[in-house]
Amino acid sequence: MISVILIEPQTEGNVGAIARVMKNFELKELILVNPQCNHLGLDAVSRAKHGKDILKKAKVKKVNYLKSFDYLIGTTAMLGTDYNIPRSPITPEQMAGRLPKKGKNGIVFGRESSGLTNKEVQMCDFVVTIPCSKKYPTLNLSHAATILFYELFKVGEGEKVGEHITMASKKEKEVILSSVDDVLNKLDFQTKEKKDTQKIIWKRIVGKSFLTKREAFALIGFFKKVGKK
């Protein structure tokens, strides 16, 4: 289980927005450590949309509660040098791959104004940073949460939008390319190299397209009709 932990959140709207995003990615437990705003205020509830149930069940705790977790992931945009080991980050993708599937795990977000303190960072097992422009590296709290929740959800077991769509198999791609070859063989090229180049390009196009099974069948039918002419 992964808990979402907000340290001294200052803005109702951000708390509500995070509850909404948690709902999007099937995270259920929200923990507020020394909140500086009313998480059940009008703005929070309005921003939460279908995540209102998460707001209502949110737990308000003291910072010592963090010691009860098996793993804590801190989030920060403030990086140190190679010698500042506590603030040496990993990427969101690395975080999602390393987090244990079992146990009591928490992802910790700091204050909107100043993030996590050094002491709070040291309580975490590791920290994660979202790669973005050095000119403006600090994301809005709810935006950062969205990116991290997405990475966690990708490697999780929840049913994902679009999973019902079947992608083209290797065999179907081979049939498409065979149909393309049949068409190319009926065309005149100045040299064999130019024809071979066309074959390579079509193979790349089909490979990069990530075709669905339905799209693959449509292309197979199309090239068969073209080949008959």
Image (spheres, rainbow, N blue to C red):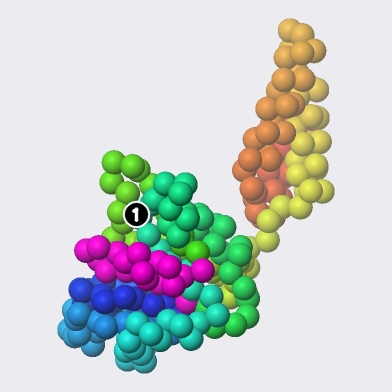
Task: Tell which of 35 and 186 is nearer to you.
Answer: 35
Q: Which residue is mark 1?
A: 78
* Residue at (47, 77) in percent of width and height: 106
Image quadrant assignment for residue 174: top right
- Is 46 on the left-hand or right-hand side of 79? left
Locate the C terminus by quadrant: top right
The residue most toward the front is 83
Q: Is residue 207 magenta?
A: no
Q: Position of residue 93 (x, y in %)?
A: 55, 57
Q: Position of residue 176 (x, y in %)?
A: 75, 40
Image quadrant assignment for residue 59: bottom left
Q: Position of residue 175 (x, y in %)?
A: 80, 43
* Residue at (43, 53) in percent of width and height: 84
- The answer to whether residue 35 is above or below residue 141 is below
Q: Secondary structure at mark 1?
A: loop
The residue most toward the top is 190
Locate the N terminus by quadrant: bottom right
Task: Tell which of 17 and 98 is nearer to you.
Answer: 98
* Residue at (79, 48) in percent of width and height: 170
User: So how many labels did they put on this image?
Assistant: 1
Task: Tell which of 170 and 78 is nearer to you.
Answer: 78
Amino acid at dot 1:
Met
Residue 174 visible in image: yes
* Residue at (34, 54) in percent of width and height: 78
Task: Tell which of 90 and 216 is nearer to you.
Answer: 90
Magenta-drawn segment? 106-125
